[in-house]
Image (cartoon, rainbow, N blue to C red):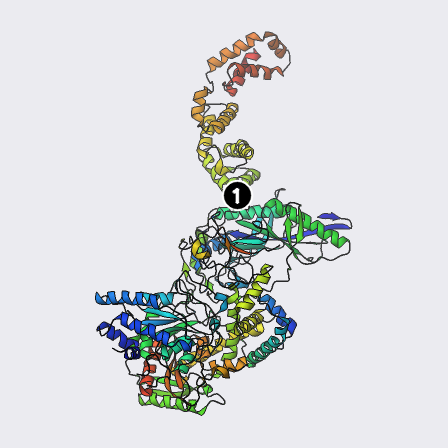
Amino acid sequence: MIEGRSGPWETVIGLEVHAQVVSKAKLFSGAATDFGAEPNTQVSPVDAAFPGMLPVINRFCVEQAVKTGLGLDAEIKLESVFDRKNYFYPDLPPGYQISQYQQPVVGHGKVVLDMPDGTAREIGITRLHLEQDAGKSLHDQHPTQTYVDLNRAGVALMEIVSEPDLRSADEAAIYLRKLRSILRYLGTCDGNMEQGSLRCDCNVSVRRPGEPYGIRCEIKNLNSVRYVMQAIEFEARRQIDILEEGGTIEQQTRLFDAGRGITRPMRSKEEAHDYRYFPDPDLLPLMLDPEWVARLRAELPELPDAKKARFVSEHGLSPDDAAVLVADKETALFFERVAAGRDPKAAANWVTGDLFAVLNRRGVGIEQSPVSAEELGGLIDLIADGTISGRLAKEVFAEMVASGADPATIVEAKGLRQVTDSEAIEAVIDAVLAAQTDKVAEYRAGRDKLYGFFVGQIMRATQGKANPALVNDLLKKKLAG
Amino acid sequence: MALDKAAVAHIAALARIRLTEAELEPLADELSHILTWVEQLNEVDTSGVAPMASAAVTSLPMRNDDVTDGGCRQDILSNAPRTARGFFVVPKVVE
Amino acid sequence: MSDSSLLALTLAEARDGLARKFFSAHELTLAYNEAVTEIEPLNAYITPTPEPALEMADAADQRLARGEALPLDGIPIAVKDLYCTKGVLTTAASHILDGFHPPYESTVTDRLWQSGAVMLGKTNLDEFAMGSSSTTSYYGPTENPWRRPDDNRPLVPGGSSGGSAAAVAARAALAATGTDTGGSIRQPASFCGIVGLKPTYGRCSRWGVVAYASSLDHPGPMTRTVRDAAILLRAMAGNDPRDSTSAPVPVPDFEAALTGDIRGVRVGIPKEYRADGMPSEIEGLWRQGAEWLRSAGAQPVEISLPMTKYALQAYYIIAPAEASSNLARYDGVRFGLRVEGNSLDEMYELTRAAGFGAEVCRRVMIGTYVLSAGYYDAYYLKAQRVRALIARDFAAAFESVDCLLTPTAPSAAFAIDENTEDPIAMYLNDLFTVPANLAGVPAISVPAGLSAGGLPLGLQITGRAFDEETVLRVAAVLESAAQFRHVPSFVAGGRA
């Protein structure tokens, strides 16, 4: 709820996400889809809408859309239709986009959000359909000209429309992250918002709690979660201010100005588009074989929700730790490799604690981790078999990060092997206590705090290598007299 | 259906065809004439008849996910009235 | 062999003559190149290609000499300027495609060149195939090589494949490719006294053919004889994985279907084609046609196609609708004419206004309207439902008959300046041809006689989907009975 001058307001948000399909070739042509190529080098005459050119659909793109629908727990429509959405723009060469209007390939589904308070919240998916991406118009290359690159024209997009179930910018962010995670788990979209493979349009309206939906505005082309949140917050405020003044919301499409953190109406004369949808006569209805769909369902990878539940039940992780580990597919895989044949809780602690700290400091993802899963596992083994203490392990880890060397090598090179020889430890303890007779007397007289001091001295004398448990054992005995 | 000049102007805008003021009236007459003629279809009882979008007999053929095209920038740009540095060039669009 | 006798040969005869080395491909093409120049007054060609033609002919001669002849080696063909030909100007007879040199070859013409055929040039047509007279071309009207004996006014060759029809009729092409969306192969064939075949939808690939109305466009052959059409269709046809509407069916040897035997073939005579005010000579020719077929052992029987009278209106909703979308790509950005503007939209509007002719504008506007919000159901969807009923009519008819016999056009060729201002009067030229486009069934026009005014009249045979064999077989019998030996007043090489 947002507190207005005259009472609380509820924000109602629906997100339309355009996810670029991971595939080698485009949706209706054989041109490549790689990011960052030289302009107009990945363009077929079909993409450029030359006279006489015709579309032929890429089976794999259909497969990716169906897998995504299955991953969203959605209804797969065995018959769907491609329609032409007609409008003029330089990065839309044919003057129409091949999309799906009345009969999309995927129907109702849902996404479950893991809320910060530990609850689960279900957000409805209205539909998912396949459509062509447009090319790129560059308006900043020349004072009076726009430059057009058609490399992206024709790349397959999945448009994923949520129900207007989101109620805050935070929720929208959680939804977007969850959706992105699911897409990456499925391998159907790489979810890279900076590169534009995941784009988000927001529909925002406000209402008094309990009242019907208000008039909404659409905010287009937000390419980061942060911008999504900022845009929603600004827009909700803007609408509330208008309504509290007694005004009405004008239904319009707006752009987010990242520099100023505001939304503003589009400058071009945005008369309501009449897209004149009709079934594309160059294509036929898409008919899916139910057995093919069933096979795809059976072959789906384990998705975040299922993986999280399994981490909790099989590995005994806390739901919070599990949630953190499954949020990103690569992280989950990394963790599982570390945890294989080891104490999963230890693995979870090292990954979410020390490793994440390093990754955050370096600003990289787990794919760029300086420490491999095998190496981290090796370190945990060395602790488990008593070769090094937990405390020294942190030092070893820091060295692994800095030098890239493996733990065993570092331990040997630095001579960090834990000392577990009782006699040797006893000798050290005797020496330390002998040098601190006054403090020993004080301890025996009741100053318990000095215990830690003795431990510190012993550790210093052994360069930290004494096995702590043994130290405690023997020290206590010696102090007891 | 009788179309007036405003309707014709609207259609022309949708179709991105510039019409002069003088052209609007005669075109409105012509188009109205044609539309009235095609409206004879309203005589036909089509209840329960599914629309026929195509005479094609096949199911939608699909292609493999292989890169078989593109990489021919010269072909793509060679007919363009205006290009620059590998791009198509159009008057600037303001958003 | 003299030029005029060379030019008088049919495709089958020329194929034979080349095989038997009566003449070379080079000689044949040379004769045709001259013919192309000779008929310039008809304005049948937009872009003759005499030098490439000779190169192709020479290559054919080499293969013929090695005994490795391809099916159409050395056969000079004219190509309707709607087919994209690699590196050769392709205009669709429109100003908006000024200077367009496609970097690709259409599937159908590629098949022809792979079969050894020779390209004489690109022929004139109604702009973007929209018309029945070939008078809407940016390059000026094409004239029919036929004229009325008593009146010297130039006549239309029909449309939209008027250039191809005129070239073949005037013996300045041995055969030609055309496209038929509402009758654009058959009606000009009828007006020019030649054979024109619209195959089944999907029989010939549309890839590389400038699209007018995607669900109605049919590439097909235009020839002097039915046998020639069978030969040419076999070379043009075939499934194309680049065209999603292309039919995945094998191509039969259509020539082998010309057995001459039509005993027992049931020929439907649709009573609804007896339109009000139909000229009696056309009705007379139609009856004569039925008699010819009966004499050959076929069984004419009256049938009903009740939806016939609505076919034109359904067509003039669906075709413009699809065209309005197909022609949106002509915007001055990537090819063709550009008229500069102060803004992007101004550039679009000025380019398209300058680049499109009046008929194209009219149809794009109609099409935009019938698809627009609030009108889609009433017009486009309604027309699609009527289309389904028309297809049903044919399906029902073909349960009791094997083919249909009708006139091709409601009149003979009319004068170019008779071209009325009323677009609907022009649309009525397609009355008998349009239903086959809506249903996608094959249909052929065969020259059957002369009008009282001395101009060709065609009869049309329509058949079941993918049964071009029956259509061709019956058409050949009709052709044989009609013995249409008339030659137009203007013919290259003079009347042999």
Please state the horizontal and vertical placement of residue A65, each as a whole percent of the image: 49, 55
Q: Is residue C354 visible?
A: yes
Q: What residue is shown at x 37% (from left), y 86% (from top)?
A: C448
The answer to which of C256 and A442 lies nearer the viewer is C256
Give the quadrant of residue A170.
top right
Residue hosting label 1: A309
The answer to which of C395 and A220 lies nearer the viewer is A220
Q: Residues within 10 Å of mark 1 (few under 14, many from 20)?
A: some
Q: What residue is shown at x 60% (from left), y 59% (from top)?
A: C343
Left or right of residue C489: residue B9: right
Q: Is residue B50 visible?
A: no
Q: Quadrant of the C terminus of chain A?
A: top right
Left or right of residue B59: residue C60: left
Is C9 located above or below residue A56 in the figure?
Answer: below
Left or right of residue A64: residue C226: left
User: To which chain does the residue with label 1 belong?
Assistant: A
Please state the horizontal and vertical placement of residue A327, each as a whole percent of the image: 54, 42
Is C36 located above or below residue C58 in the figure?
Answer: below
Badge 1 marks a residue whose secondary structure is helix
Please state the horizontal and vertical placement of residue A51, each as a whole percent of the image: 46, 64
Give the quadrant of residue C458.
bottom left
Is B3 located above or below residue A139 in the figure?
Answer: below
Q: Amino acid at mark 1?
A: Ala
The answer to which of A146 and C371 lies nearer the viewer is A146
Please state the horizontal and vertical placement of residue C110, each as a whole percent of the image: 35, 65
Left or right of residue C53: residue C94: right
